[in-house]
Structure formats: structure tokens, C-alpha cells
Image (cartoon, rainbow, N blue to C red):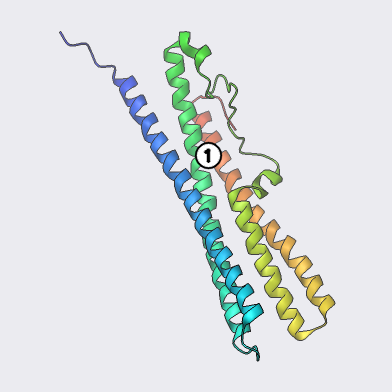
């Protein structure tokens, strides 16, 4: 006689495996986009350096080419930054979903709870999940934060060059000094607002389902 199928366990394991695949896909996409952006930015920097050192003597074509490369990298950086913020947000929510399912599996087998090292809603263990609300420096050194820094440097350089063409050098330096931190702050605000919205959404779902909050 065939044993009865444990339907809840089968569904939970299938969902957990699906979450693992989604998390892996998000990680791979995020790393690939970050690597691609760094490669493009490095190539543009190398080309720009070559044009500056070996460009045409009259310098008429060189500024236009340099400006074009800068605009290309900046537009790509903005696009990759937006996508990176979205992928990071998905990864955090997938991690919460995996934690919830792991909690269900651990509660089904309480004798194994002490051996589960990955975090659950009942015990974060040695691998506590990354908090949604964290210090801004953590966001700055993330992949999205690194892209934000590069975008801000490009904006500051563009502002400085524009000011240098129409005013004294001190004006260009002052403008760049204002644009770069202002741009970094704007990028960080986008990151942190997305994290806050996601944290609120996760907290609402966990509260509605009478589960402990992991945020």
C-alpha cells in the first residue's frame, strides 16, 4: 500500500527550491550587470586617456568624442543603477520568503531545530539576515552604491568642464564639489527609499499572517 503523500511538505519544498533558483538568478544578473558596467567604464576611461595623450593636435574632434563617451557611460550608469536597485530589492524579499519557509520546515521537525544554522523567524542563528534598515554607508559600498559614485563623478566632471568653459577655475572646482556629493546623496535616497518601501511591505505581510517580523 502506497504511503500518503505529505502535500504541505511537498509544496513547501518545491517553493523553497523555486526561491533558491530565483535568488541565484538575481545574484547572477546583478553581478553580470555590475561587471559589464565596470568594463564599459574602464574601456571608456582607457579610450579617453588615449585621446588626451595622442589625439589630434588641433583638439577639435577630441572634446566632442570625450563628451560622447562620458554621456554614454553616464546613461548606461543610470540604467544599470536603476536595475541594480530593483534586483537588490528582489533579493532581499526572496531572502525573507526563504526564511519564512525555512521556519515552517524547522517547526515541522523541532528535533532538528538546533541543527538549522540558516536564519528562521524563531532563531537567526550565526547567519543573521541583512537588515532592511541599516546605516547609509552599507548602501554606499554596495554594488548600486559604487555605480552611484561613478555616476556622480561623471556628473561632477561634466559640471566642472561646463563651468570651466565659461568661468574661472575656482568656479569649476566649487561646482564639482557641490555636484558630486549632491548626486551621491540623491542616489542614496533612491536606494534607501526603495529599501524602506520593501521593508514596510514585508512587515505588513508578516503581520497580516501573524508571523514574526524579520526587518
Q: Position of residue 74 (x, y in %)?
A: 58, 68
At 31% from the left and 23% from the top, the residue drawn is: 10
- Near-viewer residue (50 or 117): 50
Q: Is residue 46 above or below residue 80?
A: below
**Residue at the front extreme, as displayed:** 54
Q: Which residue is mark 1?
A: 92
Q: Position of residue 15 (x, y in %)?
A: 36, 31
Badge 1: few (under 14), some or many (20 or more) residues near its Cα, within 10 Å? many
At 50% from the left and 38% from the top, the residue drawn is: 93
Locate residue 81 relative to residue 139 in the image: left or right: left
Element at badge 1?
Answer: helix
In terms of image quadrants, where is residue 154?
A: bottom right
Quarter occupied by the C terminus: top right
**Residue at the left extreme, as displayed:** 1
- Near-viewer residue (189 or 209): 189
Q: Position of residue 72 (x, y in %)?
A: 54, 71
Locate residue 172 relative to residue 69 in the image: left or right: right
At 57% from the left and 69% from the top, the residue drawn is: 44
Amino acid at each position: 500500500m502506497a504511503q500518503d503523500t505529505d502535500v504541505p511538505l511537498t509544496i513547501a519544498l518545491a517553493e523553497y527550491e523555486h526561491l533558491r533558483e530565483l535568488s541565484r538568478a538575481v545574484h547572477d544578473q546583478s553581478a553580470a550587470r555590475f561587471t559589464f558596467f565596470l568594463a564599459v567604464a574602464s574601456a571608456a576611461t582607457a579610450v579617453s586617456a588615449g585621446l588626451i595623450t595622442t589625439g589630434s593636435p588641433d583638439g577639435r574632434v577630441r572634446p566632442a568624442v570625450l563628451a560622447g563617451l562620458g554621456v554614454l557611460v553616464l546613461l548606461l550608469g543610470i540604467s544599470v543603477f536603476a536595475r541594480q536597485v530593483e534586483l537588490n530589492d528582489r533579493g532581499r524579499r526572496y531572502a525573507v520568503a526563504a526564511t519564512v519557509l525555512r521556519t515552517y520546515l524547522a517547526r515541522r521537525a523541532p528535533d532538528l531545530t538546533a541543527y538549522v544554522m540558516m536564519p528562521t523567524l524563531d532563531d537567526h542563528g550565526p547567519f543573521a539576515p541583512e537588515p532592511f534598515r541599516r546605516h547609509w554607508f552599507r548602501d554606499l559600498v554596495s554594488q548600486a552604491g559604487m555605480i552611484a559614485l561613478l555616476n556622480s563623478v561623471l556628473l561632477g566632471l561634466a559640471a566642472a568642464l561646463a563651468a570651466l568653459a565659461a568661468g574661472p577655475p575656482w568656479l569649476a572646482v566649487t561646482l564639482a564639489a557641490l555636484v558630486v556629493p549632491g548626486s551621491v546623496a540623491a542616489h542614496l535616497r533612491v536606494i534607501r527609499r526603495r529599501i524602506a518601501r520593501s521593508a514596510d511591505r514585508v512587515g505588513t505581510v508578516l503581520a497580516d499572517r501573524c508571523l514574526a517580523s524579520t526587518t
